């Protein structure tokens, strides 16, 4: 049932079914090894079966064999020296490494074992097999490992590298347990596989391929300690392209996504998947900040809406009102909802909500001078140049599996309040308790994408939203995706560092030389990883999650590429303008 259809044995290779295989035996080892000394072999981009057989060796037997081996190697070295020949690096190193520890001082950690290392290379043709074996020999030589083909014994070598715990070659090598421990865990550029006994991984999406091993990088952010992710890269590194791919592939699995889009980069994706786009700033698009959350029947919903209106007014006037104006505002909020017939009774929450001009009218009707002063300060947002966004009921219902809040058409004077209203609606959807959700919107996983997050980090309310979402999203089965190109602004503030530290999934794409030191220190990057990020192509980068990290390159199908690329969005931008 599990055996190949046929096995053809030749002196130089095996033909196993439709493929070819050859076994290489490690016959020479370096004098010293470091952690992960098998990594060059495990990282070879091809099919390679590596088997390490280990047997315990009694200390007296090990010491006797090592003395004999050392005498033989030292004799060869001295003979070469007497004849003026250069010493063999393998023999010289092995002679020093064969020195046994003194028995009274030998710790338990330095016990000797018999180890055997075998490599079986697979290919689809004889020519490819010869080339693959040459590449594996070169990779082994880079760490001073000497390998030889198992000529006439490839069948025994193949069975030795199968998971049968049988060594048919018996090419023994005595080594100490310190060198053996340096080979475990077997280092690999790929993400660690589930441990034996762990349930198989069933979720996740394709992030790309690993350039170092050609392996698949498949990641499940919902299987981490939290569901947040952060994407840091310089402009043009492919961060929005990668995020669109992740959003699209999560939509396939029924995840609901909300996106704060400051540059209209997600409109084509939303149109293709039937998403909802709210273009704040366009003529006829209105948002009423006094709307009550739909479907939220908690007894304190009206109180929480009143507190949010205090924040809205603070943003509109540029700072928190003084105590007298704040007291007048609180009275006006209660009065305007009473006039609309809305009370703490959830049965009244379906009635039409009052507008901002109604709130200003209540302030004007208040006898206190502070109320009239606050009403005058709000006049531009009710009757003046900034009134278009608020002078009517909400025109768009931002519901669905994908909601894009476009901020590109908002003037700079309205961008802060428009962003606040968008974030407020997103938070209301995330924070809605399960018992208050309708059957039409069952509890599902949610992703909140904030593109160009450095714009929000400059705004107090936007920064507070990112912090609250990164802290509390997990309890509401939601994950925050922060995308930014201004790494210094994010890592240079305590709030930004808190957002990054609360992201279990961290994506680093190409970095600028000016920012690589800050990024490297914040994420503990090695010198090689820093060089990788400096020289990365668009779409290439690092995936970091705790102690697990791997390189990857985003890949997409033709259809996905057409939805995610920005190569021809300039024409659409020109048409929109």
Image (cartoon, rainbow, N blue to C red):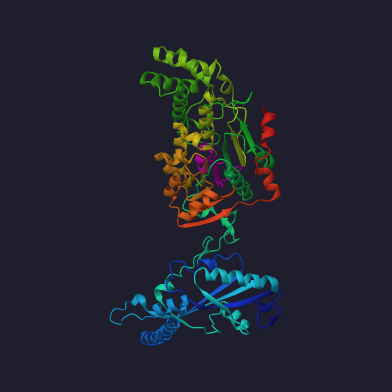
Q: Is residue 372 above or below residue 561?
A: above
Q: Residue at x 51, y 26 (%)?
A: 342
In this view, which residue lies farthest toward the left? 104
In this view, which residue lies farthest toward the front? 84
- Regarding residue 336, the answer to whether it shows in the image is yes
Q: Residue at x 45, y 33 (%)?
A: 300
- Regarding residue 357, the answer to whether it shows in the image is no
User: Where the C terminus falls, by quadrant?
Assistant: top right
Q: Is residue 103 above or below residue 567?
A: below
Residue 288 in picture, x, y percent from top left: 55, 26
Residue 199 in picture, x, y percent from top left: 53, 64
Q: Start and end of the magenta stretch?
A: 427-450
Left or right: where 561 falls relative to 99: right
Residue 142 in picture, x, y percent from top left: 52, 68
Residue 123 in picture, x, y percent from top left: 66, 71
Q: Is residue 331 above or below residue 18?
A: above
**The one of 509 and 572 positioned closer to us in this rendering:** 509
Q: Residue at x 44, y 84 (%)?
A: 79
Residue 526's image quarter? bottom left
**The one of 68 and 281 positioned closer to us in this rendering:** 68
The magenta stretch spans residue 431: yes
Left or right: where 396 falls relative to 69: right
Q: Is residue 340 above or below residue 422?
A: above
The magenta stretch spans residue 473: no
Residue 25's image quarter? bottom right
Left or right: where 48 falls relative to 477: right
- Count all numbered tags in the image, as a single digit: 0
User: Where the N terminus falls, by quadrant?
Assistant: bottom right
């Amino acid at each position: 049932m599990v055996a190949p259809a046929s096995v053809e044995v030749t002196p130089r290779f095996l033909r196993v079914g439709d493929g070819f295989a050859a076994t290489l035996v490690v016959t020479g080892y370096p004098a010293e090894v470091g952690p992960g000394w098998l990594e060059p072999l495990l990282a070879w981009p091809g099919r390679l079966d590596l088997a390490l057989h280990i047997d315990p060796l009694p200390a007296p037997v090990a010491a006797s064999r090592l003395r004999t081996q050392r005498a033989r190697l030292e004799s060869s070295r001295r003979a070469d020296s007497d004849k003026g020949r250069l010493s063999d690096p393998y023999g010289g190193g092995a002679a020093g490494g064969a020195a046994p520890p003194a028995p009274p001082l030998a710790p338990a950690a330095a016990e000797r074992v018999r180890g055997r290392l075998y490599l079986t290379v697979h290919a689809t043709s004889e020519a490819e097999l010869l080339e693959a074996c040459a590449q594996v020999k070169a990779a082994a030589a880079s760490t001073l490992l000497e390998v030889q083909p198992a000529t006439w014994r490839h069948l025994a070598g193949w069975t030795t590298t199968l998971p049968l715990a049988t060594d048919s070659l018996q090419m023994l090598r005595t080594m100490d347990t310190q060198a053996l421990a340096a080979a475990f865990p077997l280092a690999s550029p790929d993400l660690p596989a589930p441990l034996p006994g762990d349930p198989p991984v069933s979720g996740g999406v394709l992030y790309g391929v690993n350039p170092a091993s050609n392996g698949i990088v498949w990641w499940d952010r919902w299987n981490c300690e939290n569901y947040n992710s952060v994407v840091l890269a310089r402009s043009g590194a492919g961060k929005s392209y990668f995020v669109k791919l992740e959003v699209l592939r999560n939509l396939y699995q029924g995840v609901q996504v909300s996106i704060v889009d400051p540059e209209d980069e997600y409109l084509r994706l939303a149109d293709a998947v039937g998403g909802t786009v709210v273009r704040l700033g366009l003529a006829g698009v209105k948002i009423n900040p006094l709307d009550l959350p739909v479907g939220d029947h908690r007894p304190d919903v009206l109180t929480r809406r009143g507190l949010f209106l205090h924040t809205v007014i603070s943003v509109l006037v540029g700072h928190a009102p003084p105590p007298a104006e704040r007291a007048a505002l609180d009275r006006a909020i209660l009065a305007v909802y009473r006039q609309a017939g809305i009370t703490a009774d959830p049965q009244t929450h379906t009635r039409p909500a009052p507008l901002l001009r109604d709130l200003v009218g209540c302030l004007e009707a208040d006898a206190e001078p502070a109320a009239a002063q606050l009403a005058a300060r709000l006049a531009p947002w009710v009757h003046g140049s900034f009134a278009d966004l608020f002078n009517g009921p909400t025109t768009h219902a931002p519901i669905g599996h994908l909601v894009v809040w476009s901020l590109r058409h908002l003037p700079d004077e309205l961008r802060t309040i428009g962003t606040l209203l968008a974030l407020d609606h997103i938070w209301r959807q995330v924070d809605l308790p399960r018992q208050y959700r309708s059957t039409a919107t069952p509890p599902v996983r949610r992703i909140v994408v904030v593109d160009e997050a450095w714009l929000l980090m400059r705004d107090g309310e936007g920064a507070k939203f990112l912090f609250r979402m990164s802290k509390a999203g997990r309890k509401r089965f939601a994950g925050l995706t922060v995308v930014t190109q201004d790494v210094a602004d994010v890592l240079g503030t305590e709030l930004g560092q808190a957002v990054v530290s609360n992201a279990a999934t961290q994506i680093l794409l190409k970095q600028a030389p000016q920012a690589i030191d800050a990024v490297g220190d914040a994420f503990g990057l090695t010198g090689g990883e820093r060089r990788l990020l400096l020289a990365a192509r668009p779409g290439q980068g690092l995936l970091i999650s705790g102690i697990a990290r791997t390189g990857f390159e985003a890949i997409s199908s033709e259809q996905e590429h057409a939805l995610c690329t920005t190569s021809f969005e300039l024409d659409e931008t020109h048409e929109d303008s």
